[in-house]
Amino acid sequence: MKGKLESLVDKNNLPAHIVIIMDGNGRWAKKKNLGRISGHREGMKSVRAVVKGAKELGVRHITLYAFSAQNWKRPKVEVDALMELLKHYLVNESDKLIENGISLNAIGRLWELPKNVYEVLTETIDRTKSCNELTLTLALSYGGREEIIDGIKEIISKGNIAPEDINQHNFSQFLYTNDLPEPDLLIRTSGEMRLSNFMLWQLAYTEIYVTKTLWPNFRKQHLIKAILNYQKRERRFGLTGEQVKKRDVI
Ligand code: FPP
């Protein structure tokens, strides 16, 4: 059954692509006198709730910043635990993803993942590839600057494009996100006002929503609040408010 908040969502103005910086697992754990890993474990519940919630709301693409290129520098026990959680998620959720029409996708320097994680990841991507209701993209060993550098290397080595012909459109085809629409809404939990090397290219015109809620406490209701806030915004893409209203340029 739809809640009161959900009934306020305008289904004709849904963000097609929501990206989330899931932050605050460590602080959630600290508040409860638990170790950081308990925070990540609890954060997995939010991952499940948010993916399910996004699907129910009719969102087409959701991207979660699950492990950054910089996260490898965290203590080994924490890195190992995050990799285990990821593997566990992939093994256990695979059937549920298929039942719900969710295809899994991943972006980042995936070749840096431990071999067993990489294998189960590619297997899950393959198993879910014909699902077409929601795309769940996990950003893993991901960095926005790293992505741009990797894109430059690709366009130089395989692009077959003269330097003077490089433009925003053809360059973006060499980013990890080449088959995803640009994000409409970025949600960051735990109140931090920074991008932390996430989707630096893609976020150019994305609406940003920061909530103080720590990631392990984030549920479908919070997602709905973020969407309702997004729906009040006027997106201008560099134009004037009048131009946007007349829709004479876009
Ligand atoms: C940030 O919290 C969170 C992460 C670095 C990892 C997020 C990972 C998960 C929720 C679990 C794995 C996800 C998937 C999809 C398998 P933090 O540790 O930086 O928190 P803090 O800033 O409060 O210390």
Image: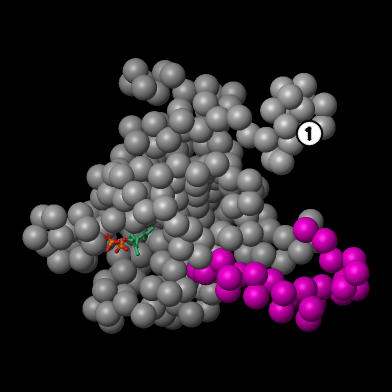
Residue 99 in view (yes/no): no
Q: Is residue 107 above or below residue 216?
A: below
Could you tell me which quadrant the N terminus lies in?
top left
Ligand 1, what quadrant?
Answer: bottom left
Q: Is residue 78 left or right of residue 148?
A: left
Return the residue nearer the eye: 137 or 168: 168
Which span is picked out in magenta? 142-168
Q: Report the residue at 31% width, 39% height from top.
A: 219
Q: Quadrant of residue 17?
A: top right
Residue 131 x/y as whole percent: 55, 46
Q: Report the residue at 46% width, 73% height from top.
A: 69
Local crowd size for mark 1, using a 10 Å CA cut-off: few (<14), some (14–19), many (≥20): few
Could you tell me which quadrant the C terminus lies in?
top right
Q: Is residue 51 above or below residue 112?
A: above
For ligand 1, tell me if the residue under mark 1 lies within 8 Å: no
Residue 144 in view (yes/no): yes
Q: Amino acid at mark 1?
A: Ile
Residue 193 x/y as whole percent: 42, 53
Q: Report the residue at 43% width, 35% height from top.
A: 226
Return the residue nearer the eye: 2 or 103: 2
Return the residue nearer the eye: 13 or 243: 243
Q: Quadrant of residue 38?
A: bottom left
- Element under disc 1: loop
Assess whether residue 144 is covered by the magenta stretch.
yes
Q: Name the residue beneath numbered marker 1.
A: 250
